[in-house]
Image (spheres, rainbow, N blue to C red):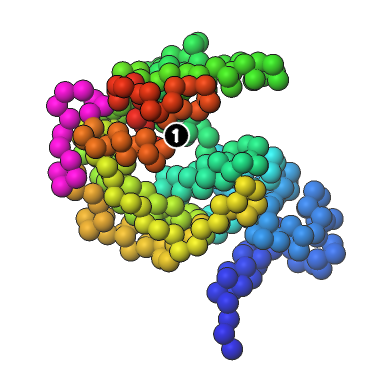
Amino acid sequence: MVVDPRQLEKFALEADIRALLGLDRDEDEYGAQVGEVASLSRWYRGFGLLGVGALTHLQQSGPPAREAQCYLLLLLGSTLFVDKSKDRVSAVVNLFVKRPDMLGEYAWGAGALAYLYRQLGIASRAEAKGVSGCLTLLQCWIYDHFPTLRPSRLEPRELERGQAGAFRWRGTAPRSSKRRDAQMLAYYRQAIDSLTPQSVSWTPYGRSPHLTVRRTLYQGLLRFAEIAEYYDPTRCLRQLGYVQGVPYPPERPLVVRRPASTLGYSLSYQSVYDSYWNNLGAHSVHLDLFSTPIRRRPWEFAENYMSWYIRHSHPHILSDSRPVDDISDADTVSTIIF
């Protein structure tokens, strides 16, 4: 008999969640034990979601090991792996916190980036009405690279020893309203279309961040659970202090489905290449083979790059912006590749 490994993973996860919640009675009595979640089968469907209220209850009443596991679920589900279910946490996160001794073995940054890449892809669909993932990471990345897109009252602060980079941008968020949100949307669309190479901070982390963090040069797939997304530093060479050239085509996914709806979005590769991540020396970009160090302007690019960029991207957001054919100076085009 052939057993589907995905079914085994689901059965294992269900057993883990039952143990976490202390379920020792019939499923019908499940709701009475944890309050907010009505049914294990309904909760679990498709890896399911766990109500934050139930987790908080368990954190306060369970044994220490279960309290720690609930806390980690809450922490990761509300920071790195955020979805749009409001007060719920993806059960798949439990796969990574059930063994506290393994927490230091996971590449949490790579997992968060893979998850964010997938959420940005889903948010690009025509029917998308929001975006999830670690938006604090995305927001800080924008503030670091685009000074003109920062709120006028927000200035970077000095970091104290050991503080995360996001603390540089602590500030008070403006009060939201429909009218204000519409005005801000129009403002930011125009601001993005008005970007010039001179208004971009190309190397906010230093001219050679890869010398400090070698993993920056990794080229391959980033993975979080069943999500795998391609990471390629040759598409952002100027952030590493090198002249940007036309990058090689990315690896083609085995299955791609990107409908207008967010529900049918699907992307998978033939292999998740865990061995690539574990063999950094063999799966890193050798910068000197791809490009040369920047010597004049921080936005330098190869001669054929701009024609490739305009052909493969959307230089403007607003329809009343100048047509691509009218662009006479390549330096006036926003030449960012994220």
Picture quadrant of residue 291: top left
Quadrant where the C terminus sits is top left
Q: How far across and down, in percent of the image, does residue 267 sit?
A: 51, 57
Q: Nearer the viewer, residue 323 or 222?
A: 323
At 85% across and 64% down in the image, what residue appears? 28
Can you say whether 310 is above or below 196 in the image?
below
Tell me, yes or no, if residue 271 can be seen here: yes
**31 with respect to 109 (left or right):** right
At 55% across and 56% down in the image, what residue appears? 257
**296 with respect to 224 (left or right):** left
- What is the chief secondary structure element of the magenta stretch? loop
Tell me, yes or no, if residue 19 can be seen here: no
Q: How far across and down, in percent of the image, does residue 296 sit?
A: 16, 23
Q: How far across and down, in percent of the image, does residue 35 sit?
A: 81, 50
The residue lying furthest to the front in this view is 325
The residue lying furthest to the top in this view is 153
Picture quadrant of residue 162: top left
| Residue 297 painted magenta | yes
Picture quadrant of residue 302: top left
| Residue 25 painted magenta | no
At 62% across and 47% down in the image, what residue appears? 260
Q: Nearer the viewer, residue 181 or 30?
A: 181
Can you say whether 186 is above or below 104 in the image?
above
At label 1, which amino acid type do we have?
His
Q: Nearer the viewer, residue 281 or 102?
A: 281
Q: Secondary structure at mark 1?
A: loop
Residue at which label 1 appears:
314
From which residue to which does the magenta span run?
Answer: 288-300
